[in-house]
Amino acid sequence: MSVSRLSLDARGPFDWQGALAWFAPRAIPGVEQVRDGRYRRRFENDGAEATFSVGAIGDRGLRVSIEGALPPAALAPRLRRMFDLDADLPAITNHLKRDPRLAGSLGNRFAPRAAGAFDAFELAVRAILGQQVSVAAATLLAGRLVARCARCPAPSRDDGLAFLFPRPRDILSADLSDMGMPGARVRSILHLSEAAGADPALLAPSGDHGADVERLKALPGIGEWTAQYIALRALGHRDAFPASDIGLLRAMSVDGVRPSPAELEEIAEAWRPYRGHAAMLLWSLPAGAGDSGSGRKATRSGSKRRRGEAGTP
């Protein structure tokens, strides 16, 4: 099998260990893997199957090895989006540091990059799987889905990359019963698959954050949290912000009391147009670390977990 290599420079310093810390617990079993300081994935591009492996070039960017008959230039734009290589971190960091709630958490480091997705449909499915469950549970469910669909099985591979992520038609033809999740969530994945199969541009960004969110919310089972999460990670909207996310609310808690989604939405107005980067920062913090003594008073409105679609990404 032919092997080609590709180097991708990042705009500003690149935190490879931070990227691995994000992608490792979310790596879908059988499709992608983080091991030995590298990210690996099996994929298909225009009918050609390939595998790539990504490592770091110090703090300057990425070095990619590609196995398969795929021109490196075809992969480069997807990896730049996935690892957010073009983010202007100094400008984003300076903007977010204007809010004392975030300044203390950022310290002397740059704001995190907004982790993207290799494939928009895959990320949208993963977002539905992650509704009201932990990262570990969502990853387990994603692995089950992949195994049920068993697209292009290669059990003899010694790297654990036995499958390609299923296409919409693969999911529609699979038996998704007894998946270990509510039937309504299964139906949401089926609705998404049907819609994406009928309209290949369904998950293509329009450049209008609000319009993209509303288009997603028109699909059964996709509410505000899921739509904002997809907009951030799959569609590249840096200002997308899933305000009802449990992890974000927990990170912004004061004296053990979480703000309500509406309160967090109000707080986050100061972070525009980089609310997505603020979300990435808050997801990396322990509960309550997002408050730095700014004088915001705790309220009781966010003290209880609300029922709904929000989850941990």
Image (cartoon, rainbow, N blue to C red):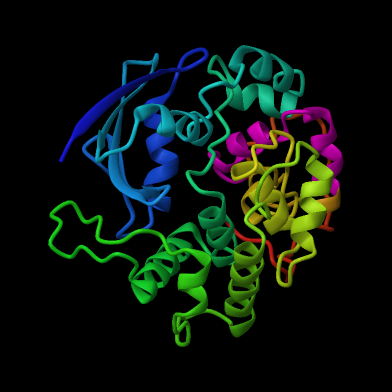
Say whether residue 145 is left or right of residue 272: left
Give the magenta-colored segment's residue range: 263-287
Residue 309 image offset from top left, x and y in percent: 69, 67
Above or below, comparing residue 111 to residue 128 in the picture: above
The verdict on residue 132 being magenta is: no
Q: Quadrant of the N terminus?
A: top left
Magenta stretch prevailing secondary structure:
helix
Is 62 in front, or is 149? Answer: 149
Which residue does the image show at 59% across and 37% down from the upper left? 280
Say whether residue 7 is left or right of residue 141: left
Is 18 in front, or is 232? Answer: 232
Say whether residue 287 is left or right of residue 208: left
Which residue does the image show at 67% across and 13% down from the upper left? 91
Residue 142 image offset from top left, x and y in percent: 43, 65
Image quadrant in which you'd find residue 210? top right
**Is there any visible trace of residue 226 in the rendered image?**
yes
Image quadrant in which you'd find residue 125? bottom right
Above or below, comparing residue 234 to residue 94 in the picture: below
The verdict on residue 284 being magenta is: yes
**Is there any visible trace of residue 260 in the rendered image?**
no
Q: How many marks?
A: 0
Which residue does the image show at 67% across and 60% down from the upper left? 199
Residue 149 image offset from top left, x and y in percent: 39, 73
Image quadrant in which you'd find residue 54? top left
Say whether residue 170 is left or right of residue 202: left
Q: Farthest bottom residue?
A: 177
Residue 36 image offset from top left, x and y in percent: 21, 37
